[in-house]
Image: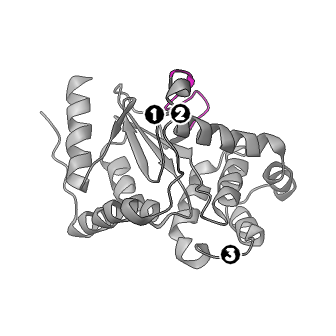
Amino acid sequence: MKSQVKVSVGLVAAFALVVAALLVWGKIGGDPADANAAEAAVARADSHVLGQRGAANVEFVEFLDFECEGCAAAFPVVEQLRKQYAGRVTFVARYFPLPGHFNAERAARAAEAAARQGKFEQMYVLMYENQSQWGEQRVPLDATFRGFAERIGLDMAQYHADYASPEVAARVQRDVEDGLALGVQGTPTFFLNGQRIEPQSAEDMVAALEEALASS
């Protein structure tokens, strides 16, 4: 029997903002890199899983930008889905900082530095819960992200080294390159079991997950 997932009115409204945001927020121009699509991966072995992997063969992937208001609007929807489908669906987050967002790439590097200490999810949550305080600013916010790192108890010497390292920058860029090859142009962009989905509501996301679970 399919589990019935209730989506609150507030989350439905939030998802409506996501759909609207996709129409107005910055996109990376140009056509998808079809020639590279065969080499791209929707998720890789080291992609960041939120929570635990699900037992079912269902994988939900979001290409995200921590400074994107549409992603922040999607955040509570995804969090509810994670709670409702915990243990069954695998939720994966991939970086896709948009060039129009001044601190998006810095935020991604901060999250990746946290990931290297096993605390990606804690940084992911802090980024979205506090986006209204740091987003859409045109000055470097390294100190803000350093404060987040301190709040989640990171080894700060390691954090500083990782945040500034070419390896972390390359890790973020690899996600971007995969996204571009897959045709991602804006955020949030969702994939379910390797196929791009374009839900128009939270209910659409629930229906897609239910269908995928029924087929798994």
Mark 1 = which residue? 53
* Camera-side mark, 3 or 1: 3
Q: Which residues are magenta?
A: 38-48
Task: Estimate how packed mark 3 is, as few (under 14), some (14 to 19) or many (20 or more) residues with alpha carbons within 10 Å.
Answer: few
Q: Quadrant of the N terminus?
A: top left
Amino acid type at image mark 2: Ala
Identify the residue shown where x is 71% and y is 72%: 144
Q: Nearer the viewer, residue 19 or 27?
A: 27
Identify the residue shown where x is 17% and y is 41%: 3
Task: Estimate how packed mark 2 is, as few (under 14), some (14 to 19) or many (20 or more) residues with alpha carbons within 10 Å.
Answer: some
* Camera-side mark, 2 or 1: 2
Residue 186, can we see it? yes
Determine which of the numbered discs, if any, sits on residue 33 in the image: 2
Residue 40, can we see it? no
Identify the residue shown where x is 40% and y is 29%: 194
Locate residue 172: give its quadrant. Answer: top right
**Disc 2 secondary structure class:** loop
- Earlier sequence position, callout 3 versus callout 2: 2
Q: Quadrant of the C terminus?
A: top left
Cα distance, mark 3 to mark 2?
30 Å
Q: Residue furthest left?
A: 1
- Residue 30 on the magenta span: no
Residue 21 x/y as whole percent: 39, 64
Mark 3 = which residue? 138
Report whether 59 appears left or right of 128.
Answer: left
Cα distance, mark 3 to mark 1?
37 Å
